[in-house]
């Protein structure tokens, strides 16, 4: 089969790829085409514009055709490139990590709001990220809180290796540690802030997720059990034990889950002292509770 990009100029290749992706029902065909073309050629947007009339080399055309085939098959652009930006920072991905999503930045925003109101004296702030994945939440927080130390846990050694690599790349390795365990089982604390984006999709809903998610995100990071709350039931009691007095637990919630999570937090001896924080779509996305001082 001939390569449709062979001999094409950069601009014509971009248009041809965008047309292919539109035909495959890609919601962001123009953006995806530009990003994939830039990655195949090693050029940023300025470079693509400046060299628009230049023909693709045979190697470039071959690489672009491979990218196009993968995207048309439903693989997310972030998986194809192996990286994703989160909180303005670059994160390498692996098969054991979720693709960080803009919705999850709501957890970082709420954690920072709460942290700024904490009174911590005589020691450095301590943060834990449970189910750390690529390290996106933890490393975003460490980037914003220069004197804090963070620990990320995960049951996946591959995910921990990915997070550790991202910490090195971002210059945060000296303030981050990574531990293989279930939830907080191997941690002692006390932690000032505990964050988590746990699996919260009810098991029966997994087959209904978009192809990009169900085929390319790790099932372990998606499946929240029969009702979607298994992870919260395990996480909340452990967090309550390991939070410092006044410390806070902040978790991501799926659509319609915030009130039930607040109930679980209250039952776990935590105090819900503020409303959940909505994402840009207006969905209550970040839920928090505090361990009140005695």
Image: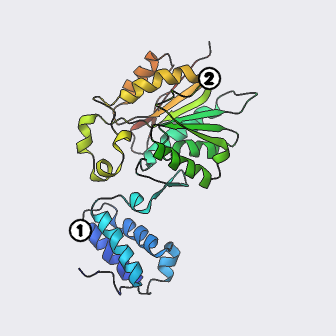
Q: Is residue 224 left or right of residue 194?
A: left
Where is residue 201 drawn, in percent x and y?
32, 37
Colour convention of the picture? rainbow
The picture places residue 67, in percent across and down from the top left corner, at 36, 68
The disc placed on residue 106 is none
Q: Residue at x 23, y 68 (%)?
A: 23
Residue 62 placement, left or right of 250:
left
Residue 291 higher or lower than 145, as above or below: above
| Residue drawn at point x = 64 percent, y = 30 percent | 117
Up/down of 84 relative to 163, above or below: below
Mark 2, Cα crowd under 10 Å, few <14 / some 14-19 / many 20+, is many
139 or 248, nearer to the observer: 139
What element does badge 2 sit on?
strand
Residue 70 in the image, given as x and y percentages of width and height: 31, 64
| Residue 48 place in picture, x, y as percent | 47, 77
Report the label total.
2
* Quarter of the figure with the N terminus: bottom left
Instruction: Give the residue displayed 34% in from the left and 36% down from the top.
Output: 255
Which residue lies at the image location 33% right of the left edge and 66% below the top edge? Answer: 29
Tell me if residue 88 comes above or below residue 150 in the rendering.
Answer: below
Q: Residues within 10 Å of mark 1 (few under 14, many from 20)?
A: few
Report if the CB atoms under discs 1 and 2 are less than 8 Å apart: no
Q: Residue furthest top?
A: 294
Q: Disc 1 marks which residue?
A: 23
Q: Quadrant of the C terminus?
A: top right
The disc label shown at residue 244, or none:
2
Res 273 seen here? no
Q: Secondary structure at mark 1?
A: helix
Q: Which numbered disc flags the more N-terminal residue, 1 or 2?
A: 1
Marks 1 and 2, how far apart in space?
54 Å
Vertical relation: 215 (above or below) 53: above
């Amino acid at each position: 089969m001939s390569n449709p990009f062979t001999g094409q100029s950069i601009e014509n290749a971009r248009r041809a790829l965008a047309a292919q992706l539109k035909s495959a029902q890609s919601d962001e065909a123009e953006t995806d085409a530009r990003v994939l073309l830039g990655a195949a050629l090693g050029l940023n947007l300025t470079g693509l514009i400046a060299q628009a009339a230049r023909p693709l080399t045979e190697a470039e055309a071959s690489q672009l055709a491979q990218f196009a085939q993968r995207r048309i098959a439903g693989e997310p652009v972030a998986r194809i490139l192996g990286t994703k930006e989160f909180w303005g920072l670059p994160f390498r991905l692996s098969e054991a990590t979720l693709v960080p999503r803009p919705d999850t930045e709501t957890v970082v925003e709420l954690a920072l709001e709460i942290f700024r109101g904490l009174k911590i004296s005589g020691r450095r702030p301590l943060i834990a990220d449970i189910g750390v994945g690529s390290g996106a939440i933890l490393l975003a927080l460490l980037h914003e809180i220069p004197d804090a130390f963070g620990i990320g846990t995960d049951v996946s050694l591959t995910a921990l290796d990915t997070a550790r690599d991202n910490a090195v790349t971002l210059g945060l390795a000296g303030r981050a540690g990574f531990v293989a365990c279930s939830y907080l089982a191997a941690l002692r604390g006390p932690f000032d802030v505990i964050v988590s984006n746990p699996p919260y999709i009810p098991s029966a809903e997994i087959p209904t997720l978009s192809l990009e998610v169900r085929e390319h995100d790790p099932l372990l990071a998606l499946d929240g059990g029969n009702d979607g709350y298994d992870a919260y039931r395990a996480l909340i009691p452990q967090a309550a034990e390991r939070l410092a007095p006044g410390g806070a637990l902040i978790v991501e919630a799926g659509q319609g889950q915030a009130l039930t999570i607040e109930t679980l937090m209250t039952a776990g001896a935590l105090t819900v002292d503020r409303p959940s924080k909505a994402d840009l779509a207006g969905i209550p996305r970040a839920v928090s509770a505090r361990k009140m001082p005695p």
